[in-house]
Amino acid sequence: MEAEAMDVPPGGVEAALSCFSFNQDCTSLAIGTKAGYKLFSLSSVEQLDQVHGSNEIPDVYIVERLFSSSLVVVVSHTKPRQMNVYHFKKGTEICNYSYSSNILSIKLNRQRLLVCLEESIYIHNIKDMKLLKTLLDIPANPTGLCALSINHSNSYLAYPGSLTTGEIVLYDGNSLKTVCTIAAHEGTLAAITFNSSGSKLASASEKGTVIRVFSVPDGQKLYEFRRGMKRYVTISSLVFSMDSQFLCASSNTETVHIFKLEHLATSRPEEPSTWSGYMGKMFMAATNYLPAQVSDMMNQDRAFATGRLNFSGQRNICTLSTIQKLPRLLVASSSGHLYIYNLDPQDGGECVLIKTHSLLGSGSTEENKENDLRPSLPQTYAATVARPSSSSTSTVPGYSEDGGALRGEVIPEHEFATGPVCLDDEREFPPIILCRGSQKGKTKQS
């Protein structure tokens, strides 16, 4: 769900995309290229609809869209210290801000907009773009690694607390106070992400072998997953499903791992009185007498499901989304392709690749000849994954459990103060005062 600046992959082949990111509720994909940027809707498996495209800003390396609104934030290599905020439906620039060094990443929800530089983080009120706080006393963060809860009722922010270890600083973006620090990993951090409600935080180190999930705001470890043991990898993206039941991780390898967030001790029935049952109990009891590092490794949960990519070494991001009432795994790659897989939420296993879309043209390739998007499956499976149908003309206001607006629904008017309500699915953003700003490391007091 986060924008990723692309490097030239091994072998010297230049990436087709300079950046790409899924929006906060995984209903839209944004890509940046040398020519400009594009926004796509993710409402269908078979068809990839381009919502907007612009060539006015070349060499884009950050593009972030606010949910399904018309607000988009863009940063270009031609002006890497300047953030531009646009209303793409009207074709107008809302404001731009300049900073003291290059912008590395941008995160936003309906309450806050974060601009991350290497040695500082700027926190803006997204409704009027007022600068609320500048975090200056942070360790060097050369990759711009940070995460923002999409639930604006808490707006938790997480960023690395050390340049040498995997410490995470948890910060409250609403009260503008540090909540706690989490000793997540021994090695430096490679990825951090919140679930949709802001109640869980997942992290991975640069080794990429172990992924941990912590409770928010107390920072207690809830889950520990092992991605693999054979080799260290570079985690490209880490994301929860919107219902927080699954956690997905992609890397520079050809495998995407999906973990299921469930406690085995409470979810599994009592082992039967069989030889294998007794052996299982003895095995678990033995972990109490082994060194902590060994017992921890034995207790780590493995992947619930996997997705096989037809490439490795390319930068990519993944997400889990419900499209046409079924759960899907989506992977976007720097080569300019979007891969869509079916995910079985009950039995897991190998995810089936059903569609490949080109993000640079109108063509798409159907990888699975069984093109029925609703395959014949057991009724229990269909009942498990069924979701209410969305309607782009619905005018019923409401929220999902994570605090965001439901797909196809109009955001309540009080959500964005006096902001007008759209009649289509392109929701309006909060009213923002037209501005031209320059942030040079000083904190404005609200």
Image (cartoon, rainbow, N blue to C red):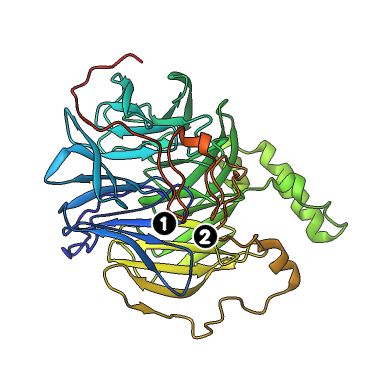
Residue 333 lies in quadrant: bottom left
Residue placed under numbered mark 2 in the picture = 392
Q: Which residue is mark 1?
A: 28
Which quarter of the figure has residue 112? top left
Q: Position of residue 74 (x, y in %)?
A: 25, 45
C-alpha gap between disc 2 and disc 1: 14 Å
**Depth-wise, is mark 2 or mark 1 nearer the camera?**
2
Residue 69: x and y in percent read 41, 48
Q: Position of residue 268 (x, y in %)?
A: 77, 52
Q: Which mark is residue 287?
A: none
The residue at 23%/55% (across/down) is 18
Residue 335's x, y, as percent? 27, 66
Q: Nearer the viewer, residue 214 or 157?
A: 157
Front in this rendered view, residue 263 or 370:
370
Mark 2, residues whose alpha carbon is within 10 Å: few (<14), some, or many (≥20)?
A: few
Q: Is residue 66 above or below residue 379?
A: above
First of labels 2, 1 by sequence position: 1
Instruction: Give the answer, above or below, for where 428 lies relative to 408.
Output: above
Asked if residue 86 can be seen in this view, the reply is yes
